[in-house]
Each structure stands twice: as structure tokens, then as C-alpha cells.
């Protein structure tokens, strides 16, 4: 059994939990971060010097950075539909994971933090509007990529779906204007049919 340190309403923890559940890996998760605290103790910082969540422990291995953890789980435990057998496939999946982290996460999180975690009177709505426009422009890139594909890698789900899959739940759960995105919407509906996605991603936004 692996150990995951991090509260379950964190998008980065959700990536890890969803992935582990798809791969059939048992997880012992501990609530760390925000209201639970525990991520600024010397003990935690020795494991993850960023003081952020998630952190994964698997035997002797301690590792942080959610995308890296997802890739580790896939390499170590991925089998069947979830195995990525070639360097090319791993790269194709990884590019969408890192695209989310480096490109979409900032504007989407700005909108999320404003609309979900900031009292209405204190929201910077000009910044929110800009964040919504940027995020929608980025979703249109995934919209084009999903043309003729059921999942990011084609017919089968993969780790390439995980960061953007966590993000699409948040995007559709928030009261934001969205252009028609038929391919993204159909892919999101496919994700919603998966029990691990329902359990680890589809929870009230807090
Ligand atoms: N790039 C890091 C970012 C980690 C991160 O920013 N985690 C947030 C939660 S999503 C965090 O630790 N926030 C502080 C807290 O929860 O106390 C990753 O992907 O793991």
C-alpha cells in the first residue's frame, strides 16, 4: 500500500488518488494542508521541502510533484489499458499533463480561488474575466485535439487524461461562461462514467 499525504479537495491530490484507483493501487491517505495544516512541520518539510501537497511514500521512495507521482504510479503499477509501453506514448501523454501544469493551471486556479474560496465582495472580477477567457482559449486547444479521439491518447484513457480530467470537472462545476466544446463535453461525459473519477474527482468544490 502506498501513502499519500494531502487533503482530498486539492486538485493535485485528486490526480494521484484518481490514478491510483484506476491502477488498482491501495492508498493510505492522510489529510494534510489548508485547514488540516501539517505541511509546515520539520517532519513534512524533510519529505517535501516545498511544504505543498501531495507527497507520495512507497516503501523507501518519497516523491513530490503530482504529475511526477502520477507518472511513477503508471510506470510502477500500470498494466492492461493503463500501461504505456513506449517512450513515444509516454511523451504524448506527458505533454498534456505538463501543458495543464505549466499553461492551464494558473488561469483556471485564479478563477477557482476567486469563485470558490473568496467572498463575493472581495473578488477581483476583472481578473476573473481574464482568467475565464484565457482558460476557454486553452480548452479550445484540447477541443481540437479530441476530434476523433475518445480520450487524450485515443481509444483508451491514460495518465494524459488525468490533470486535464481533474480540471474539466472544476471548470464545468463553476458558474462561468463556456463556448460550445462538443469534443471536450463528450470526453468529460466519458470520464464521469468511471467509478475512480466519481470517487476521487467529482466532489463539491471547496
Ligand atoms: N506543482 C505542485 C503544486 C502543489 C500545490 O500547489 N499544492 C497545493 C494544493 S493543490 C498546496 O499544497 N497548497 C497548500 C495547502 O494545501 O496547504 C504539484 O503539482 O504537486
Image (cartoon, helix red, strand yellow):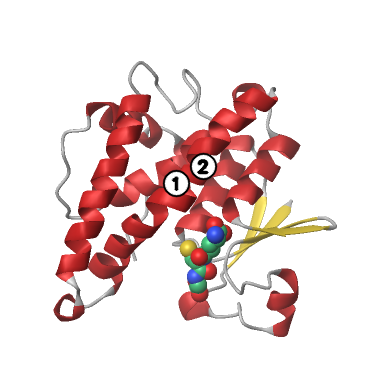
Note whether ligand 1 is within 8 Å of mark 1: no
- 131 in relation to 155, above or below: below
Looking at the rendered image, the quarter that the C terminus falls into is: bottom left
Q: Which mark is residue 97?
A: 2
Q: Nearer the viewer, residue 26 or 145?
A: 145
Q: Secondary structure at mark 2?
A: helix
Residue 193 in sight in this render:
yes
| Contact (Cβ within 8 Å) of mark 1 with mark 2 | yes
Q: Which mark is residue 100?
A: 1
Residue 189 location (% of width, % of height):
31, 32
132 displayed left or right of 96: left
Q: Residue at x 61, y 74 (%)?
A: 51
Residue 72 location (% of width, % of height):
70, 44
Q: Residue at x 52, y 45 (%)?
A: 98
36 displayed left or right of 60: left
Q: Secondary structure at mark 1?
A: helix
Amino acid at each position: 500500500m502506498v501513502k499519500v499525504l494531502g487533503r482530498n479537495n486539492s486538485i493535485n491530490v485528486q490526480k494521484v488518488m484518481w490514478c491510483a484507483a484506476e491502477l488498482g493501487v491501495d492508498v493510505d491517505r492522510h489529510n494534510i494542508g489548508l485547514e488540516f495544516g501539517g505541511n509546515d512541520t520539520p517532519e513534512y518539510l524533510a519529505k517535501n521541502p516545498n511544504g505543498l501537497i501531495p507527497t507520495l511514500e512507497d516503501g523507501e521512495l518519497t516523491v513530490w510533484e503530482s504529475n511526477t507521482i502520477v507518472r511513477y504510479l503508471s510506470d510502477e503499477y500500470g498494466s492492461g489499458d493503463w500501461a504505456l509501453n513506449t517512450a513515444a506514448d509516454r511523451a504524448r501523454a506527458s505533454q498534456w499533463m505538463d501543458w495543464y501544469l505549466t499553461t492551464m493551471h494558473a488561469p483556471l486556479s485564479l478563477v477557482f480561488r476567486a469563485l470558490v474560496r473568496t467572498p463575493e465582495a472581495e473578488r477581483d472580477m476583472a481578473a476573473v474575466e481574464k482568467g475565464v477567457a484565457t482558460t476557454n482559449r486553452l480548452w479550445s486547444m484540447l477541443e481540437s485535439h479530441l476530434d476523433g479521439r475518445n480520450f487524450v491518447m485515443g481509444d483508451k484513457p491514460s495518465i494524459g487524461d488525468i490533470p486535464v480530467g481533474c480540471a474539466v470537472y472544476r471548470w464545468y462545476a463553476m458558474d462561468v461562461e463556456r463556448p460550445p466544446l462538443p469534443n471536450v463535453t463528450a470526453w468529460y461525459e466519458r470520464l464521469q462514467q468511471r467509478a475512480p473519477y466519481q470517487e476521487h474527482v467529482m466532489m463539491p468544490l471547496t
